[in-house]
Amino acid sequence: MNRIEVNPGAVVEFEGRRYLVTHRLDLEQVLARPEIGGPHQPLRIRDLRQPVNPETGGSDGSEPLSQPQPDLMVIPDEAWREAERRYEIIKPLIENPGKIRQQALMQARTNGVGIATVYRWLSVYQETGRMSALLPMSSPGGRGKSRLNEAVEALIQATIEEYYLTARKPKVTRAAEEVLRRCRLAGIESPHPNTVRNRIKALSLAQTLTRRGKKREAQQRFRALEGSHEAHYPLEIVQIDHTPVDLILVDNLSRLPIGRPWITMAIDVFSRMVLGFYVSLDPPGALSAGLCIARSILPKDQWLAKLEMELSWPCWGRPRTIHLDNAKEFRGRMLQRACEQYGIHIEWRPVATPHYGGHIERLLGTFAGRIHDLPGTTFSNPAERGEYDAEKQAALTLSEFEVWLTNLIVGVYHQEVHSELLVSPLIQYERGVLGSERKPGTGYHPREADEHRLYLDFMPFVERTIQPTGVVVDEIHYFADVLRHWVGAPDPENQNLKRKFIFRRDPRDISRVWFYDPELSLYSEIPYRDITRPPMSLWELRAVMRRLKEEGRAGVDEAAIFETLNRMRAIEEQAVRETKKTRRERQRRENHRAADQPRSSGTSLIKEVPEPEADRPATEILPFEETEIIKL
């Protein structure tokens, strides 16, 4: 199982013993009794684990290992479409478990498959909760196969956009012929016509009708009626949107301004609970949406522990439907396939339809007003800003802003009475899960057993060949013994070319990458080849590359990168030492002045941060706090 069930009747593991859950107590605790003797006792849900199978994993209470599964982006399109077809057949059984036999008989007859096959597909899907479980057994999950050349893929997409999705409404056959013509003109190998047909089949019908001059038909068939976006239970509908923050942040070491961040946030429409958020210094895209979704699905216990916050954020689970902005950057193939893998339906918000995203837009607007009280705010317009120097007043780092925002969400917003609900979002969410006198609850949503793999599935990737010295990403070398088997491996489709492999990376700590082994269908962590090199973020690497360019360094290699990094850090540390005394003197004067003024009764949400010491090592970079991959 890839998910941990914690509702009454489920068997769970706690401190190496197996327990049977008997009752729900609240959003954070259940009542359970040992399977073999012993009284009932309350258990925290965050401490429960998936029971270890004695035949495969021993009985010592250790965490189960990740199970082999194909990377989403190496699964051939034909195999993925077959998995989608099978999912659509069993979907009525999943959504209506009270009438499984009737639904199974109907779906078997309608789709021309045996009822035993329907039950088998339902069983394997429920075992994992992932679309990839429904892949045809004959498919090796992409093993030994390669995707299209990037140039060919780009040409196909351009032809679909510029030729097929037009009011002329050309036939699919003509679109395939147009791709062939363009490939010949470009001097590149053309794909099989079926490849073009498959790309077109994968298009949203609503999008196809709209772009091909049938906007009214698309609206009639797919646009929900006013008011139909009201959710009836938690995680039925989740809205996600992003906004630039009216705030200047500073870096961790020198406390110098580094720019305005972006926030991507998810809200549960039923309860108005914030399910997750993602803060980045880069404009939003499929990555920010993907990582926001991943954080929304996963429990928040580890996240809060990393921030050293003793708060309760008891929401987790896969949403049924997500409303996303219709912008082009959110329509990445990776994001769509990751959502399909975890049973999440995406609805793209059409332009000029505010009812699709009204809840999240109001939420972001509410938080924007709070942000204007922070030091370093740029306000929302020049009239408000006046002569206020935002860069000079900037004080918060990205991690400190995340702490402040988490406090605002969990400690304030979730607790306040919502004007439409007439209760707080937390109480509304609790009623939806545990039930009330008027309506039964949904029960706890399953918790993901393999949180790391879920994050990886929502991350973009890079492809690289493997050399005797390992793999190189952005001039940085990585190596581990697991790569030796693949050194110089030829491309299965063209023996004259070297095979490319998938690597994923956390930009907040690029001292390691994750390598997807196509034979084992597992990811392995690959560290720096030179493990004495210091950890570095992607943003530091960009700064180093800019510095090297300014110095006129034509040849950039790993040694030059880390040499420059060390030099830049030394300069920053020296600047801190030289200004530390002045800053303390200024703070002392301000404290004296403040002692003469009446104290405010308000409570600050900003976590107090100590002055950086000269000999203090750089803050440890934590994985999955910020993640961005540059797709090459």
Image: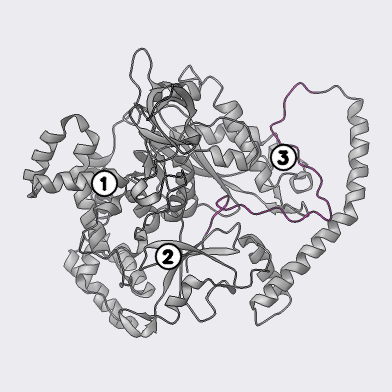
Question: Helix, strand, or loop for circle 2?
Answer: strand
Q: Which mark is residue 516?
A: 2
Circle 1 SS class: helix
Nearest to the observer: residue 338 or residue 144: 144
Instruction: Identify residue for label 3.
Output: 385
**Is label 3 or label 1 in front?**
1
Report whether 613 appears left or right of 544: right
Q: Nearer the viewer, mark 3 or mark 2?
A: 2
Give 333 or 434, whichever is nearer the viewer.
434
Sequence order check, earlier mark of 2 and 1: 1
Instruction: Give the CA separation, mark 3 to mark 1.
Output: 55 Å
Mark 3 element type: helix
164 vs 352: above or below: below
Category of crowding for the residue at label 1, using alpha-carbon neighbours closer than 10 angstroms: few (below 14), some (14–19), many (at least 20): some
Chain-order first, disc 3 or disc 1: 1
Residue 448, image x and y in percent?
41, 43
Q: Residue at horizontal 52%, vertical 33%?
A: 363
Q: Locate the N terminus and report the quarter of the image it occupies.
A: top left
- The residue furthest front is 37
Q: Which quadrant would residue 36 be assigned to in this image?
A: top left
Q: Which amino acid type is marked by label 3?
A: Arg
Could you tell me what secondary structure mostly forms the magenta stretch? loop
| Foreground residue among 102 and 48 | 48
Amino acid residing under circle 1? Tyr
Q: Give residue 537's position: percent from left, percent from top.
A: 63, 60
Residue bearing mark 1: 125
- Picture coordinates of residue 585, whole percent (x, y): 93, 43
Q: Earlier in the sequence, mark 3 or mark 2?
A: 3
